[in-house]
Amino acid sequence: MTTTQQATPTSTDIRWVCSACGQPAATGAVHIDYRAITDAEQAAKAWDARRHSLNAFDLADVFTMPSRAQWQVTCDGCLQEQHDCGGCYEISLGQVPTFTALLRWQAHLYAKSWFDATNWVAFVHRLAQEHAPNESGAAW
């Protein structure tokens, strides 16, 4: 069973840009620091404990919501010069050359217990907007 029409498969190449130096990144990694994930998870637990209700938000809750751990794109040069994750989850840019490959990785990442503590959804949304700024989604 297929969920799409039978058509010639296509995918858009991703033009990665290094978060550190701002230059195009043909090689390098998409990565996230495990320490930042742990910090984000602990901050979210503390935030939940302070809230009056786990079923609803009030405006004060929204303004005190903790940040999520941030995914980064880093070229090989910056990885060697200034990268200090001390333990990262890392995806080689060679493994995600297209949006189709990125979608496959996203399916894999959903299974990680720490996925919700990261900004992956915002990261991918920003990447899509950068590649197709004139396309709009009804919910965006």
Image (spheres, rainbow, N blue to C red):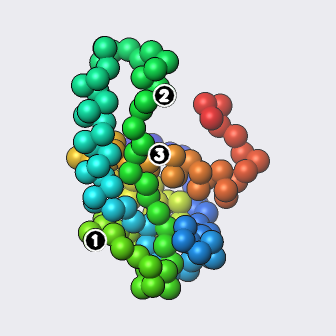
Describe residue 108's horizontal placement relative to residue 94 as left or right: left
Who's the residue at 26% across and 33% down the image?
Answer: 46
List x then y, in percent, for residue 18: 56, 72
Amino acid type, label 3: Val
Q: Are marks 1 and 2 in contact (CB under 8 Å)?
A: no
| Mark drawn on residue 63 | 2
List x then y, in percent, for residue 9: 55, 61
Given residues 31 and 9, the one toward you in this image is 31
Given residues 17 and 5, the one toward you in this image is 17
Describe residue 54's horizontal placement relative to residue 99 as left or right: left
Amino acid type, label 1: Gly
Q: Pointer 1: what residue? A: 86
| Mark drawn on residue 121 | 3
Above-or-below relation of 62 to 116? above
- Spatial separation of the CA atoms under disc 1 and disc 2: 30 Å
Residue 86 in view of the camera:
yes
List x then y, in percent, for residue 87: 26, 69
- Earlier-in-chain disc, 1 versus 3: 1
Q: Are marks 2 and 3 in contact (CB under 8 Å)?
A: no
- Mark 3: give few (<14), some (14-19) or many (20+) Cα within 10 Å: few
Amino acid type, label 2: Phe
